[in-house]
Amino acid sequence: MARREAIRIPYPGSVISVNHYQGRRRDGGTYIKPEAQAWMTELGWVAKLLHLDDWELPLHITCDGFFRNERAAPDLSNLAKCALDAIEEVCNHNDKDFRWHDGKRVIGVKEAPYLLLTISEQPPSSMPSKSVSRRLKIQRNS
């Protein structure tokens, strides 16, 4: 049976967008901004608990976003680079073996914005309804 896991993680804003997560150094090089690096580390630690090294490739990652309003809701494709790099860091798979799928964008949630990243061994459309699934939730102590 194909494995499937869901990770719920707070959405920190545009800092994790492919257009904003890197900064430029004076020598012309780039670096990952501290806020983006912190989010990537947080996601990486949770993904490490899933033991993705044992999973069948390619891994399919579907991102659903839950936002307060349309203005704050990003194009989910722009979040792929940060999310996939974070997962790649903690497992022995190259992100070329990952397949990104934009999920749904839900507008109008009352709680803080968050992302639901579902990692599976099969594409979302072919997942049987009885697949193994559990949801991991990241909560920050503020």
Image: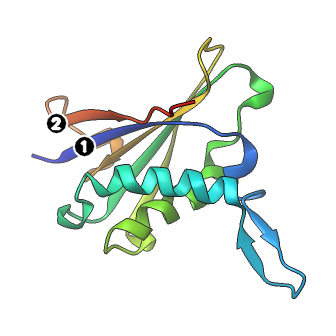
Q: Amino acid at mark 2?
A: Ser
Looking at the picture, does residue 41 appear above or below residue 126? below
Looking at the picture, does residue 117 appear above or below residue 47? above
The quadrant where residue 18 appears: bottom right
User: In this orientation, which residue lies closer to the viewer: 130 or 136?
Assistant: 136
Q: Position of residue 12 (x, y in %)?
A: 65, 40
Q: Earlier in the sequence, mark 1 or mark 2?
A: 1
Residue 121 is left or right of residue 29, and the answer is left
Q: Residue furthest front?
A: 142
Q: Residue at x 44, y 44 (%)?
A: 62
Q: How many marks?
A: 2
The quadrant where residue 36 appears: bottom right
Labels 1 & 2 near each other (Cβ < 8 A): yes
Residue ID for mark 2: 131
Q: Residue at x 42, y 57 (%)?
A: 44
Q: Position of residue 130 (x, y in %)?
A: 13, 30
- Specify the label residue 4 is tagged with: 1
Residue 116 is left or right of residue 121, and the answer is right
Q: Residue at x 25, y 43 (%)?
A: 4
Q: Secondary structure at mark 2?
A: loop
Q: Residues within 10 Å of mark 2 (few under 14, many from 20)?
A: few
Q: Amino acid at mark 1?
A: Arg
Q: Secondary structure at mark 1?
A: strand
- C-alpha separation, residue under disc 1 versus residue under disc 2: 7 Å
User: In this orientation, which residue lies closer to the viewer: 116 or 96?
Assistant: 116
